Amino acid sequence: MTTRRDVVIIGGGHNGLAAAAYLARAGLSVEVLERLDTVGGAAVSAQAFAGIDARLSRYSYLVSLLPQRIIDDLGLSIRLAPRRYSSYTPVPGGEGGLLVDNHDTAATDASFAAIGARNDADAWRTFYDGTARLARALFPTVTDPLLTRSEARAAVGDEALWNSLIEQPVGRTITETFASDLVRGVAYTDALIGTFASNDDETLAANRCFLYHVIGGGTGDWNVPVGGMGAVTGELARAARLAGATLTTGAEVTALDDDRVVSYRVGDTEHRVAADRVLVGASPRELNRLLAAGRASGASGASPVTEPVAEGAQVKVNLLLSRLPRLKDASVAPDAAFGGTFHINELFSQLQSAYDAASAGRIPDPMPAEIYCHSLTDPTILGPELRAAGAQTLTVFALHAPDRLLTAENNDRMRDELQAAVLASVNSVLAEPIESVLMTDAAGNPCVETKTTRDLEEALRLPGGNIFHGDLAWPWLNDGDDASTAAERWGVATGLEGIYLCGSGARRGGAVSAIGGHNAAMAVLDERSGT
């Protein structure tokens, strides 16, 4: 027996939930099919350590690109807390470090001077004034039909700025802008989150990554989701259910044919549902797998969709500490250092060395990484006893750990080796080993959880562990690109009638933004209205 819906959404991540909420509010019958037992995908909170009352944002952890428009449209009760400190970066192997205080320009200038980078303080402000202008021009467009490249360039209205951040490798621009190796490295890390690229990346993949990391909210600020990432997807799920969408969990989608019939399994029971439109929150690679299964089953077979290059390049380590560790740099209080993004071994030269090592098949030494402490800004993710005792969470996001280093056979060993490399890098800037302040779980095990790219592919089906489902695309169409359909104008087209991308694989869909879901929903509504 085949049931019927107006819209079926494959994948109950935050984008799928956003699309469901919009379309159900428009009066359509919508069903979301989620393979896991809970919705949320990568944007979830979890009790990572047995018997410990702490709910960590297990995968995604900060929010910048979620537009206020979507929050308001769907009536989401979400609080995103700002961080006073932008970043702290200790001098590797030396003394002191750079503390960028969003509330104290004089203190920030003094910190630049203390690391021998006095002249870079003014350059820093000029550079980020430029990214702020870029953000103000481009971010308001992400929930509208795509601009063309020429229209985006005109919207920015600054040829020098456009050329420096869009046309030429951003690493080259950073080298030309700053004198300090440390300052260059801090600026360049935004080009490497989830992207494996050299410091002079002619492909401009680093530029595209950098752009999305500096335009969020029209400011580029990255904020803390109060209550953890699960609070964000919890609100999206609530909005979808209230609008009338059906959220089916534990639903393993097994095939999709080009007549938009979705086959799925819940437990031992097989189901089929036909839809006028199918939105896919899974990756383009996963979509192709489902289409191939549709062909193999004898159903009419759709042509595969184009897959972007998909290789993750990070390892993520979650920790629970009895307290923040002491720093080698005694001039900076730990709550200030950990209050923003804590950069470790991310000199510009170190980033290139790490890229070269990983390209040659080796784990970088030292491992470039950055730390985020959710609980300093939002202690609500900890139970009352942990809060009273001064416990803190740390998330370490290490760069240049590409999926090519791992296989199904070596993943367990590589996880241990990557974790050891990350903790060694962390310890290189501390006055005491991080292990000395690690809490233990109910079984007496250290509270450390490490996720490799292979782990992400296995748990979430992220291709190659790529957190964006593949290399990011510019948030505009090239001049002359076909924009004859609503799906093409909204950046969600697959080339298949009635089947759209609504996840991170959609143009403008990456990060916890709900933009992919919003835009896929708008494409459906535009098509139904004939616009």
Image (cartoon, helix red, strand yellow):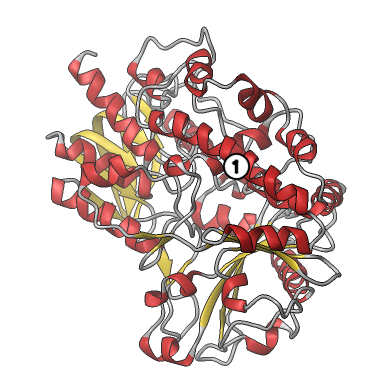
Q: Secondary structure at mark 1?
A: helix
The residue sitting at 82% across, 66% down in the picture is: 92
Left or right side of 219 for 362: right
Q: Which residue is mark 1?
A: 128
Left or right side of 499 for 177: right
Left or right side of 54 for 325: right
Furthest-top residue in view?
A: 480
Count of marks overlaid on the render: 1
The residue sitting at 22% across, 38% down in the picture is: 22
Please name whichever residue, 132 or 121, is drawn nearer the observer in this view of the structure. 121
Please name whichever residue, 43 or 384, is drawn nearer the observer in this view of the structure. 384
The N terminus - image quarter: top left
Q: Answer yes or no: is residue 167 visible.
A: yes
Q: Is residue 271 above or below residue 419?
A: above
Q: Name which residue type carries label 1.
A: Tyr
Which quadrant of the structure image shows residue 410? Answer: bottom right
Q: Residues within 10 Å of mark 1 (few under 14, many from 20)?
A: some
The C terminus - image quarter: top left
Can you give x and y, in whole percent of width and height, for residue 373 in the image? 54, 70
The residue sitting at 65% across, 83% down in the picture is: 325
Can you give x and y, in whole percent of width and height, for residue 24 in the image? 17, 39
The residue sitting at 32% across, 60% down in the picture is: 79
Which quadrant of the structure image shows residue 329? Answer: bottom right
Can you give x and y, in whole percent of width and height, for residue 169 in the image? 73, 30
Q: Is residue 465 above or below residue 137?
A: below
Q: Is residue 192 above or below residue 494?
A: below
Q: Answer yes or no: is residue 267 visible.
A: no
Please name whichever residue, 12 or 340, is drawn nearer the observer in this view of the structure. 340
Can you give x and y, in whole percent of width and height, for residue 123 in the image? 70, 43
Left or right side of 29 for 520: right
